[in-house]
Image (tube, helix red, strand yellow):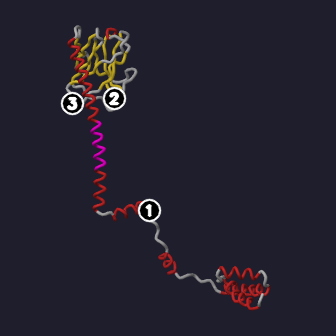
């Protein structure tokens, strides 16, 4: 290798020893040092001098103002989720807030309207059922041997019954609606005290009277029962009476 090129590497030895040489020049110098013992010897001398300089400088505490200066240059801590949320709220214009409030109001009204429509549909279905029951009751009055029996216990009412045609309709006056999730259930009472379900029905608030047609299996005749009772049961009815007894009719 030429002496002129060695001189170029020697110029970088001091900077390399101090750690200030850029990476490309440092890599080139390291490759050269592998093949040049003279440069390695000079580098060892420079390294010894640089280490001596570092040890010769007495330690000195940084000024108190340095900590504050460094802290002022650090990035500000990130805001919490709620801090960002409230900050965004402050940036929302009155028009945007009013639009959002109107949108929420419309959603609420839509849900309310849906619930109202569903309730009206349920009431309409119940009224339709009442009309059908009343039509059956009117037809029964035209049949011979149809009896009218007054309710003997509980809420006032009467029973239209035709044992030959195996049909019966129960009428009650001022019957309150069953509690939420509950229904009235009719029980036919056998001579041995056994209860057989005669169907479930509902009562509307404020109605003067409530009607319910007795539902009975074709193979079971009303003549085989001595009376009926009504209890409050879970929605859809129970296999056996479990709730409060509301009324009783003896045949």
Q: Earlier in the sequence, mark 2 or mark 3?
A: 2
Q: Earlier in the sequence, mark 1 or mark 2?
A: 1
* Residue 182: image tag: 2
Q: Residues within 10 Å of mark 3 (few under 14, many from 20)?
A: few
Residue shown at 39% from the left, 20% from the top:
240
Residue 58 % position (x, y): 64, 85
Query: Which corner quadrant of the image does residue 51 belong to?
Result: bottom right
Q: Going by the image, does 95 lie left or right of 20?
A: left
Mark 2 to mark 3: distance in Å?
Answer: 18 Å
Instruction: Report which residue position mark 3 lands on.
Output: 206
Q: Which type of secondary structure does the marked residue at label 3 adopt?
A: loop
* Residue 80: image tag: 1
Tell me which segment is drawn in magenta.
Answer: 106-118
Q: Is residue 233 above or below residue 64?
A: above
Q: Residues within 10 Å of mark 1 (few under 14, many from 20)?
A: few
Q: Which type of secondary structure does the marked residue at label 2 adopt?
A: strand
Q: Main secondary structure of the magenta part?
A: helix
Where's the N terminus, which quadrant?
Answer: bottom right
Asked if residue 217 is among those painted magenta in the image, a careful observer would answer no
Camera-nearest residue between 58 and 71: 71
Mark 1 to mark 2: distance in Å?
Answer: 49 Å
Residue 243 % position (x, y): 35, 24
């Amino acid at each position: 290798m030429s002496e002129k090129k060695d001189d170029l590497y020697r110029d970088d030895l001091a900077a390399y020893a101090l750690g200030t040489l850029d990476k490309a020049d440092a890599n080139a110098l390291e490759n050269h040092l592998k093949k040049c013992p003279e440069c390695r010897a000079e580098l060892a001398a420079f390294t010894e001098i640089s280490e001596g300089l570092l040890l010769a400088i007495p330690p000195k505490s940084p000024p108190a103002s340095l900590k504050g200066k460094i802290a002022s240059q650090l990035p500000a801590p990130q805001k919490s989720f709620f801090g960002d949320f409230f900050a965004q709220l402050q940036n929302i214009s009155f028009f945007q807030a009013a639009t959002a409030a109107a949108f929420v109001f419309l959603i609420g009204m839509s849900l309310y309207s849906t619930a109202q429509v569903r309730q009206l549909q349920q009431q309409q279905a119940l009224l339709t059922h009442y009309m059908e029951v009343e039509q059956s009751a009117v037809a029964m009055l035209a049949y011979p041997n149809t009896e009218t029996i007054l309710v003997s216990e509980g809420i006032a009412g009467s029973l239209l019954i035709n044992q030959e045609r195996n049909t019966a309709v129960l009428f009650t006056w001022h019957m309150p609606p069953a509690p939420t999730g509950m229904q009235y259930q009719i029980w036919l009472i056998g001579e041995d005290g056994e209860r057989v379900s005669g169907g479930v029905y509902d009562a509307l608030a404020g109605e003067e009277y409530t009607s319910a047609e007795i539902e009975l299996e074709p193979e079971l005749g009303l003549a085989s029962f001595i009376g009926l009772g009504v209890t409050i049961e879970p929605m859809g009815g129970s296999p056996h009476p479990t709730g409060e007894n509301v009324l009783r009719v003896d045949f």
